[in-house]
Image (tube, rainbow, N blue to C red):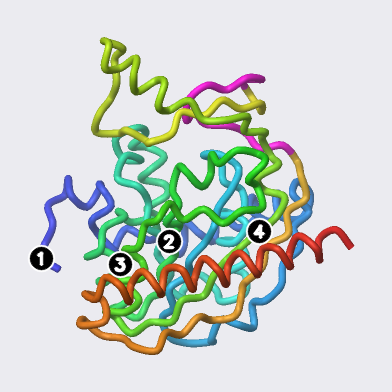
Amino acid sequence: MKSLTTAQQGLGWSLDQRDPQFIEQMMPYWKWFYDHYFRVQTDGWHHIPPHGPVLLVGSHNGGLASPDTSMMMYDWFRRFGTQRSAYGLMHPSAWKINASIAKLAEKTGAVRAHPKMGIAALKRGASVLVYPGGAQDVFRPYKDRHKIELARRKGFIKLALREHVTIIPLISVGSHETLFVIGDCYEQVKRLHEWGLPWVDDTDPEVFPIYLGLPWGIGIGPAPNFPLPIPIHTRVCPPIVFERYGRKAAGDRAYVDSCYELVVTKMQQGLDQLVIDSEK
């Protein structure tokens, strides 16, 4: 990557903002939430090889708090140590909405969700964590809490094919019950915007949920939330390996589509089984 200015380094364009010492300082706080607040159960970590990069593809839940994400991060660090590099691709709007929180996220390994950042991290030998479903995933309605929603985004497939890296899915149950998403009124709000309602176009989340949860009681729009203390069960699923890799495979639209459908199918099967296992 080309050298970056100081301003760019603070906007998620640098891999060097990750701070293992800061992560160590955060571990006791994550541990308390893990053990006492969410009472996390987890399994499947044997699917992650002890060395080398992998592409972790998650379905995340629970609004902007997304507690399963932080609990997965805690599990990664306590199992592999803070020195084994892993970077999470974060939506660029995070730096516009709250730069201070985004800076803290950078210290834990968050970088801008852009192909060149994923490629740079993998070439450095680090693993990459991506949640393709974005806002549509974390704010999907409560009735769809057990449905994989990757929003038809396939950049992660192209990244895996181009860089010859294995995909390992991450799923969870319980996290999407830490708030109650009633529905999405994005299209209605967008129509009001066309009639003159103010709208911040460059941070358009493509969702405008209505939900019940803390601290608002009734939350309107993609506002931050504090998760309810619901038990969470996370699972690392078996690796997904494709038949073909390379730039040519990444440029084959039909092949990318089939790989995407395979990942969604495997993740949905895994989530269906996790729901059954968690109810035992």
Q: Which of the two labelled residues, at mark 1 and mark 2, occupies the earlier sequence position?
A: 1
Please name whichever residue, 243 or 20, is drawn nearer the observer in this view of the structure.
243
Local crowd at mark 4 within 10 Å, few (<14), some, or many (≥20)? many
> Which label belongs to residue 2?
1
Residue found at the far top of this picture: 196
| Cα distance in 3D space between marks 1 and 2 | 23 Å
Disc 2 secondary structure class: strand
Q: Amino acid at mark 2?
A: Val
Question: Which residue corresponds to the image point at 30% horizontal and 33% vertical from the top-left?
Answer: 203
Numbered label tally: 4
Disc on the earlier residue, 2 or 3: 3
Give the mark nearest the N terminus, 3 or 4: 3
- Determine whether 153 is above or below 241 in the image: above
Which of the two labelled residues, at mark 1 and mark 3, occupies the earlier sequence position?
1
- Contact? badges 4 and 1 (CB < 8 Å): no
Disc 2 designates what residue?
A: 130
Q: Is residue 233 rendered to the left or right of residue 4? A: right
Residue at 64 percent of width and 83 percent of height: 46
Identity, as a three-letter code, of the amino acid under mark 3: Gly
Q: Position of residue 224 (x, y in %)?
A: 52, 31
Q: Amino acid at mark 4?
A: Ser
**Residue tagged by mark 3?**
118
Question: Label for residue 49?
Answer: none
